[in-house]
Image (cartoon, grey):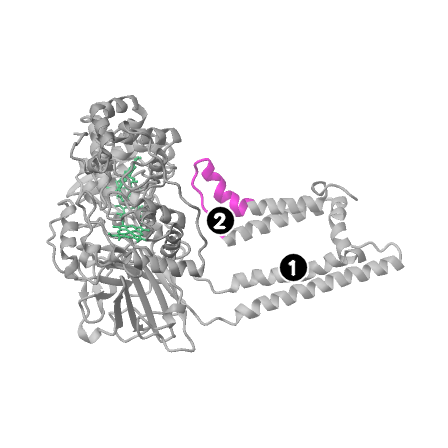
Amino acid sequence: MRARASSPRAAMIPGFVFAAAMTCALSAPLAAQEENALGRDVYDRWCASCHGYEGLGDGYAATYMLPRPRDFTQALYQIRTTASGQLPTDDDIMRVINEGMPGTTMPGWEEELSLEERLALVDYLKSFSRFFAAGEAPAPLTFSSPTRATEEALADGREVYELIECNRCHGIDGRGDGTSSPTLVDDAGMPTYSADLTENWYFNGGGTVEDIYQRLRTGLDGTPMPSFTDLIDAGVITDEQLWNLAHYVRSFAPEDPPGITEVIRAGLVEDAPLPDGVDDPLWESAEAFYIPMGGQIIESPRWFVPQVAGLWVRALHDGGELAVHVSWSDHSESPDTAWAAFQAQVLSALGPAEGDMEPGPRPDGLYLQFPMEIPEGMDKPYFLMGDPLEPVYLWHWESTADGAQEADARGLGTMAPQGNASQSLVSEAAFSEGRWAVMFRRTLENEDPGDLQFRIGEPVPVGFAAWDGDNGESRSRGSISSWHYIFLQEPTPATVVVAPLIATLLTAGLGVLVVARAQRREREGAEGPDEGDA
Amino acid sequence: MNTKPWKHPLGQAAIVVVLAYVLFEWGIWLLPPLFGVASAPVPATVVLQYMGTVVVGVLIWVSDSEERWKQFKAPIHRVMVDPRQKVLRTALMVTIPLLVAFMTFDRVRPTVSAPAALRSVHPAPPGQIDFRGETMVLNGLENPLRHEGDLEEHYEEGKRIYVQNCMPCHGDALDGQGHFASAFNPAPLSFQDPGTIVQLTESFVFWRIAKGGPGLPREATPWDSAMPAWEDLLTAEEIWQVTIYLYEQTGWEPRTWEEEGAEGEEH
């Protein structure tokens, strides 16, 4: 079983290595596994549930995830320092074991397993494939040192990005929305999304400029992401230009990965009108908060492979109205027929758990969820759309509908729009270069007893959910967040200035008095004897 | 005159105050975890209160003996009157008011924080629950699979159930670091942590898995918890199997009913 002769790698390995592998007899890996009892124990205990006891990538949880756990018998490794088509070095394998592959279900094990255990694992993983037993130890490429990220370097990187057509897959703004994207599959035939370059914390091989450069040199074998070393060899671009490109790619993402915010601050706008569209320049100055999202795996039917990994939220108010701006990366403006076949592949890749789902046109969607009124104590409605006793109030937007609607829900799957007479939301949505931006606006207070009334200076619970239709998401299959809070900033109270001022004057005055008194006493003491200093 | 600072009462007082501050601010929070005991930062108001007590204590101690009190005051007095100390004196008279200004500003400036959620992580479990229409008495209930069938098989089934259902939140390494974990607050618990399943009987764990977040009492904020109720998705046998997996895989022993009885209703 382990020795599948029809491995796609066979075609990529030089003939003599392949022949050597054959003469080495198929039992070589087995013998190596027998000896490595520690490797096997640790592997069976911690890795087999995903990668399978035989290393075939068919563990219990395999059909719950995309990308699938790696099939080690194919000896295809994405994160290498070796040339495309080559085996990884031991250090390369160790690196992935230590750090995992961010953005996938593959976790890092550095803190969980001892060095001895991890070393044994490297050998054990290699023993799943004949190719390691056969050839020489693979030689890493030599990498030049990084250039500096100057303006010119970034401008050149940008030109290279277009010249060698990264945008074909990754899109102009790097959000993975290129025209080729819906056609991509990995070597195992599984649908594969082009990486979203604005989220470098999810890069499989790390998000630094050096990591990016290395991936560009080596490619991610087994995926559609190619190596670009041959372009250097052919003189199309220089090595320096590849560094420039790496800097440019790095610049798509923020300096640091976003922290998690519990409270979204809605800034007070005093001397300008509130934004009335998604592109209003006022949004640029508003603070952006990142809300991480996870799959809805709480109630059936569940969804294990959500595409909306996080939302950026901005909020502003002017004392009369609240405006909220939500944006996120999305490969397409669903429903997009170019992605229909891709969606079908995603749905068929998932196991039959959770009821069947037919591929079909589905919109993208988003909701903001609030309690019906600002809670007095800790109590809130259930974070997953409330329950029959404690309903929630929602702002719901769908890419195919005409504007956002106010809605109510009493539990997952019970969302119902409010009557026409109760609708009072203003909204606008725009899709551009792989990014959705949706704006909602409502008066803080209104006459509708079915709506939440906002109050300045009080934290209001808010939750989020989002759907990517072309990924097959709808209804209970999507991504969700916990409860967060939105806080409408108050006008700065005078005490903020006055209190420190008074405190300073008081202490300074007191200090002067005490010192003056001590000095006077000292002088008097020097004149009249025996005064002491009590 | 030139005594070592730690032999001088003023130096000693300063050392005690600084040490106390370090202990309250960071020690209580960071030290116990080194010994495997869970801890949390001390709230600022409580630190202030503790520091007040320490300062009063120190003052009582220095003024306790006439000699010490004199010694204690001497350097302070010198700074206030000695012409040679003018630079230091002026510096202190500027920085102290500024420090006070900053501290007041820090207190009155409008801060935005979520309402404090005083959540009970391990509330008292119900004495009995209704599981799929049948009454289960939790008090004294043991995991029946420990004496039934093959433990190895239960463990393997538990592993399958765990990776298919619990892994995205609780993590492959059972450390609460699943790939969806960052989306949920309160965070999925780590079973490696000495503060979770080690403290619990298997029947408590059964209850938590069966009834999930929505089954928690009010003091444990059921509306916030992303922990699903598994009653409809998993059978009783499957829940007992995944419970076995949690303990076997982490190497912890479940709390027994004898221990439970000995320590009363503490959770």
Eyeballing the image, is B216 above or below A29?
A: below
Residue sitting nearer the eye, A349 or B179? A349
Q: Where residue A14 sits: x, y (%)?
A: 24, 34
Element on which disc 2 rests: loop
Q: Quadrant of the N terminus of chain B?
A: top right
Residue sitting nearer the eye, A142 or B112? A142
Q: Identify the residue position indicated by label 1 in the image.
A: B96
Asked if the residue under mark 2 is in contact with the one under mark 1, i.e. CB atoms within 8 Å, the reply is no
Q: Where residue B223 sits: x, y (%)?
A: 29, 54
Among the two numbered marks 1 and 2 on one chain, the one whose residue lies closer to the N terminus: 2
Question: Is residue B140 visible in this depiction of the protein?
Answer: no
Mark 1 vs mark 2: in front: 1
Q: Is residue A139 magenta?
A: no
**Chain designation of label 1:** B
Which residue is located at x 45 percent, y 58 percent?
A150
Q: Quadrant of the C terminus of chain B?
A: top left
Q: Quadrant of residue A61?
A: top left
Q: Quadrant of residue A59?
A: top left
The disc placed on residue B42 is 2
Q: Amino acid at mark 2?
A: Val
Q: Where residue B248 sits: x, y (%)?
A: 29, 31
From which residue to which does the magenta span run?
B23-43
Element on which disc 1 rests: helix
- Seen from this angle, which residue lies furthest front? A235
- Mark 1 residue crowding within 10 angstroms, few (<14) / some (14–19) / many (20+): some
